Amino acid sequence: MTGRNDTEQLTTLGVVDCRDGLAGGRFSSVDLTQAFLQRIDQVDGRLHAFLRTTPARALEAAAEADRARAAGDLRPLLGIPLAIKDVLMTTGIETTAGSRILEGFVPPYCATAVEKLNSAGAIILGKTNTDEFAMGSSTENSAYGPTLNPWNFERVPGGSSGGSAAAVAANEAPAALGTDTGGSVRQPASFCGIVGLKPSYGRVSRYGLIAYGSSLDQVGPITRSVADAALLLEVIAGADQRDSTTMPEDVPDFSSALTGDISGLRIGIPQEYFVEGIQPEVEKAVRSAIEHFASLGAEIVPISLPNAELALPVYYLVVTAEASANLARYDGIRFGLSADGETVFDHFRQTRGAGFGPEVKRRIMLGTYALSAGYYDAYYLKAQQVRTMIRQDFDRAFSQVDVLLSPTSPTTAFRIGEKVDDPLAMILTDIFTTSANLAGLCGISVPCGFDGDDLPIGLQLIGPPFGEEKILAAAYAYEQSTDWRLRRPKL
């Protein structure tokens, strides 16, 4: 990597490359941060991956990082610039969750995951675009306009972490944090040809994450390589007293699992995940990847997840019910948008009517209905019972295999506007990802090919709860023995 000191070359670097280059003195953090800020200035006017950047703050932090390194500071992310999805609280930086109802809101505290990045020496470049309150699969539901896919500006980048995925794919940041409630890290990573890791529920603190579905939400890294994802997970993982759902598990050295050797690894192929309706090029690419895993010494095992077809209806009952409860706090009194009204209830109606977009309103109404008297048992309670059955399917599968493999999404990136008026079609893009959230599993998406329109295809590896080492090891072995990771969009 010697001699990489011009803007274009520096912005092609991933997190591990940045770490090694800074440690070797080949460039400074100020050089690196300036390069990424310049790249954002060059391409983001069209791409719209960022909602806001913090150049003065970032450059000041970069200069401080350079001084700290000169004094012997060895923190793992010292001086490395990163992007943060705009559903994670950032002290002193506007945080809107892609919604008008939080426009101008500057949090007085920081999300634990961001706090851990800061403690490790990372530098925040800015906040990335998201579907409003993370409710969507295309980043078209943002109140501040859609993000475009760097591979094709007529296509969506996926969602809801589409801004983070587009920023990483377009070399605007070496990595970014996203959040995954039903696939919102993995699906945009697939659409943008990069790596997206959803940790197990309880692996990473949700404190400071603007809640959507509290039993499903998880913070995860979006990166250019599996090694970068492993490094970031090492930093952000761990128990947090401020989030009682985090588990008191030791954080493994995830990077040490990346040996490239997966001989004897048992990979389960769920028959229910290869169904009618998958784009033929996606199925062909994923089946080719399965053969490649076999050539690396993995054992391929057909398995069944009998309740797989129930995952989507269960997910959309559970997540909308939780959204209805979580979004009740936006009343125009404590923070955020406040509209005028003659009475208190009129004030609530005016504020929420003006502040929430149509998709958020739709999900609040669905969730409120599912929780209402007379319907709770028939819908929400039944969904939770079936959710347990889905978890049990996975428990049985993981008694036979180490990881599961499937497409990340049934299609490649669709056209902007193609599904925005068809909620059911949009929901179906999450058909292979939602079950991991329902069961609290970990999952990772890695590139495995391209379709005829030169759009990326991703494969998904799913592991048992707290089985991140297994999926990272398998993903790394595949990534390093193929060349899909080397292809980048040309903006």
Image: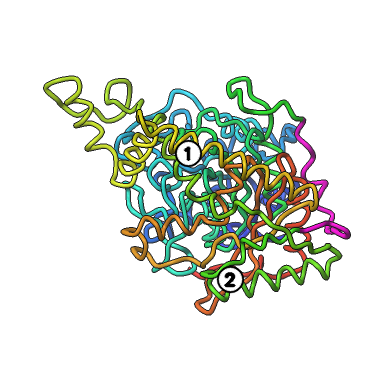
Q: Is residue 76 left or right of residue 318?
A: right
Stretch of the chain drawn in magenta: 250-267
Of the pair 59 and 83, the residue shown nearer to us: 83
Q: Where 68 falls versus 282 (above or below)? A: above
**Helix, strand or loop: magenta stretch:** loop
Q: Is residue 355 left or right of residue 374?
A: left
Q: Quadrant of residue 54?
A: top left
Which is more foreground, mark 2 or mark 1?
A: 1
- Residue 77 percent location from the top left of the image: 67, 40
Specify the farthest residue to the left: 342
Q: Amino acid at mark 1?
A: Val
Question: Label 2 to label 1, Cα distance in Å?
Answer: 29 Å
- Label of residue 153 in the image: none
Mark 1 sits on what residue? 318
Q: Quadrant of residue 154?
A: bottom left
Q: Amino acid at mark 2?
A: Val
Of the pair 312 and 248, the residue shown nearer to us: 312
- Label of residue 282 in the image: 2
Q: Is residue 447 left or right of residue 327?
A: right
Q: Is residue 250 left or right of residue 452?
A: right
Q: Residues within 10 Å of mark 2 (few under 14, many from 20)?
A: many
